[in-house]
Amino acid sequence: MLNYALSRLLTFIPTFIGVTLISFSFIRALPGDPIQVMAGERGISDERYAELAKQFGYDRPIYVQFWDYLTGVLQGDLGNSFVTKRPVWDEFFALFPATLELSICAMIFAVALGLPAGVIAAVNRGKFFDRALMSTALVGYSMPIFWWALLLIIVFSGNLQWTPVSGRIDLLYYFPDPTGFMIIDSLASGQKGAFTSAMRHLILPTIVLGTIPLAVIARQTRSAMLEVLGEDYIRTARAKGMSPGRINGIHALRNALIPVITVIGLSVGTLLAGAILTETIFSWPGIGKWMVDSIFRRDYPVVQGGLLLIAVMVMIVNLTVDMLYGVINPKIRKR
Amino acid sequence: MTLLHIRNLSVDFATASGQFRAVDGVDQDVNESEILAIVGESGSGKSVSMLAVMGLLPWTATVTADELTFDGQDLLTMDPRARRKIVGKDLAMIFQEPMSSLNPCFTVGWQIREALRVHLGMGRRERQARAIELFEQVGIPDPEKRLSAFPHQMSGGMNQRVMIAMAIACKPKLLIADEPTTALDVTIQAQILDLLASLRDETGMGLVLITHDMGVVAETAERVSVQYAGQKIEEQPVVPLFETPHHPYTSALLDALPERATEKRLPTIPGVVPGQFDRPAGCLFSPRCQFANAKCKAEAPRPSSIELGHARCFYPLNSNERAAS
Ligand SMILES: Nc1ncnc2c1ncn2[C@@H]1O[C@H](COP(=O)(O)OP(=O)(O)OP(=O)(O)O)[C@@H](O)[C@H]1O
Ligand code: SF4
Ligand SMILES: [Mg+2]
């Protein structure tokens, strides 16, 4: 198990270098640069531009800049934001809890609904529930996040006024945030109504972000269950006189979980991509919104550093999922 | 006493191309502590008829019977919940592929203890003790350690022993073994059969042994039922069956045995068991029967008397009538 983890960690190295290169090139491939953006409508004189470029080091050859960046990264220095002048590292970890909170809630939402839905659909294969569920899942899967978010906002925030439109909590609440997780901090603050407010703010973004993973998990659970239900050991369980609930929920689900866990791991990447859009729509102060803002400002250090950190997060999650896979699948564990 | 009592059992499958009768009017009795072998070529409905008894057929199957009782209880009218109290407890079954018949995600110990908990409501300690006892009974060495192994960590023979231990965990009255040795090595096959026979001697349970192998039948069985294309075509105690078969199919099976059962597979008779689309009118065996005449091809024979092994044939072999004609 430990060897396996170490060997997986080794494969991180090329991925890491690749991601560094891509994040570095991506923002530079966009037209414009931070100096032009800072100058804005007024424009800037060529002399002043050259002066600033020299100051920021953009006059040097691109490979020298990359080498600088890479050595910085390896020393744990991602540079400072152009705009705020604060270290990218600090900004990222100040905002990351908000994204993490939203992503975790979305994942819980997706798993908590997707697993049972997939199981029930498989057990009732071909019947009304199965068909209804699978068509819904297909719609959910192909629903553009933007459109889905607006629809929910119009209905639940606009017409029904049940949920707030943006942010993480009502403005009247203010309390220290030691963990960065609004749900926990609001509870810890002891302020009346703070927790409820935080939860209410979470509902729509959670649904919007969780919809695609929900659809993916439900479909994968269903197909994995259908495969498992045809296995010989399910017949054995029935020959033992086990109840359908036990057979579906324990004997079959335990086996079906193996491919489902993989899919859950894979959807973390999709989830973070979705978080960028979702946060922008709901003005959710997480790294997604921060990245989008920084791209518009051509804030090179933030974009390249942020992308790198996001990629590392995804890699860590995938590694965790791999480990979990070993725990849940005895055939892998013992090898 | 009769444990399992079957009269006119039929199973129809709904398939994309219409109804298919896999089991056709089978009568069968199994007594306490006897070993009944069911033999027949592939596709003759051996498995399906016993799966029908267990209630393990998929929803595409329609089971009909005049009578279907186990231990005096009517299985036809019983609701599923009540049936689950019998199945796995008093009525157990093991299958051909021990490797795939055990759940790969749970230890074999867990799979055995589960049956003990659900059916007998045993406590944790008691379950463990009984599981160890069962492993000893089926000849698994080092039981404590083996109980925490996963199926893929053990050989096919060991897994079949686990399956047997699991099946006899609640001391069943009847054990159905569906080709329990087909997937195993020859030496292991003999061990497993010996184990089943000795368990029968110890516990007095009835044993239904489904097999392809006439050698197994000769060595293990006491009574033999021969199935063909979903019908029981003959039934006799083992010795007379080998000496005086009454149905031409049984006779052909025995004739095709090289040196009478040294070959470990079912002998070959020209032609194949009719399937869904080539079911003949009249006697189902007529296309392959050397005695077939016009009547055989037009009319379906009914089972004959018990003296003639219930042979479904107009002209049973080794009979006085036949000798006379
Ligand atoms: N689920 C099913 N749906 C449709 N037909 C089936 C199904 N299960 C079995 N059959 C058919 O029923 C017939 C009898 O099958 P069965 O498995 O009982 O044969 P068998 O005598 O056990 O043969 P084998 O020795 O190969 O195990 C076969 O023709 C088979 O194709
Ligand atoms: S009824 Fe005729 S065809 Fe059928 S087994 Fe007897 S002799 Fe052969
Ligand atoms: Mg079979």
Image (cartoon, helix red, strand yellow):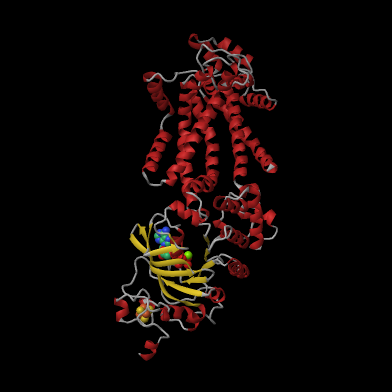
Q: Position of residue B127 (x, y in %)?
A: 63, 52
Instruction: Looking at the picture, tell me which residue is in the foreground, A268 or B57.
Output: B57
Q: Position of residue A158 (x, y in %)?
A: 38, 19
Residue A135 shown left or right of residue A309 in the figure: left
Q: Residue at x 33, y 59 (%)?
A: B17
Q: Position of residue B268 (x, y in %)?
A: 47, 76
Task: Say above or below: A320 vs A42.
Answer: below
Task: Say above or below: B295 vs B162.
Answer: below
The quadrant where ligand 1 appears is bottom left
Q: Residue at x 39, y 90 (%)?
A: B323
Asked whether residue A277 is in view, the answer is no
Picture quarter containing residue B25? bottom left
Instruction: Looking at the picture, tell me which residue is in the foreground, A103 or A109.
Output: A109
Q: Quadrant of the N terminus of chain A?
A: top right
Task: Say above or below: A132 vs B141.
Answer: above
Picture quarter containing residue A324? top right
Asked whether residue B160 is in view, the answer is yes
Instruction: Looking at the picture, tell me which residue is in the foreground, B283 or A6.
Output: B283
As drawn, the residue found furthest toward the bottom would be B324
Q: How many numbered markers are drawn?
A: 0
Task: Say above or below: A17 vs B21.
Answer: above
Residue B165 shown left or right of residue B31 in the figure: right
Q: Position of residue A291 (x, y in %)?
A: 54, 22
Residue B133 shown left or right of residue B311 in the figure: right
